[in-house]
Amino acid sequence: MGITVWPHKFCVGIITNFSYFESRVGVTPWSMGRLTANWETPRWYHTFTELSEMVAEGGFMIRRKVEPRPTEEQVRQNPDLDDCHRVPYFLIFELVAS
């Protein structure tokens, strides 16, 4: 498993360049002009099955899963959000002890 460096807009790259079933590690560069310093953060890609197994192995159950997305109005105001309007950037889990 190699490391992939993603540009700021990464959803299109995920859809077109990788298989959902390919677990991997990536790096997100933070180098926007408004920042006073640049840095990189790691990211991990796992299938929902793999995430569910990790949760269960940790002694938890998923009570709820949320896939946040911007509204159509938010996309109109900020077109850069268009890709995450079609594919979620994040999954949020509410976990309970099992």
Image (spheres, grey):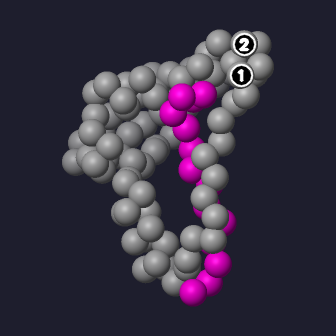
Q: Quadrant of residue 92?
A: bottom right
* Residue at image point 51% right, 33% down: 87
- Residue to which mark 1 is pinned: 72
Residue 3: percent from left, percent from top? 30, 39
Relative to residue 34, is residue 40 depicted above or below?
below
Cβ atoms under marks 2 and 1 closer than 8 Å: yes
Would residue 84 appear left or right of 22 to someone viewing this image? right
Would residue 36 appear left or right of 86 to someone viewing this image? right
Of residues 14 and 74, the one nearer the viewer is 74
- Residue to which mark 2 is pinned: 76
Q: Residues within 10 Å of mark 2 (few under 14, many from 20)?
A: few
* Residue at image point 27% right, 39% down: 19
Residue 60: percent from left, percent from top? 55, 79
Q: Secondary structure at mark 1?
A: helix
Would residue 98 appear left or right of 43 to someone viewing this image? right
Of all residues shown, which one is farthest toward the front?
A: 72
Q: Secondary structure at mark 2?
A: helix
Residue 55: percent from left, percent from top? 49, 72
* Residue at image point 60% right, 58% down: 65
Amino acid at circle 1: Glu
Q: Residues within 10 Å of mark 1 (few under 14, many from 20)?
A: few
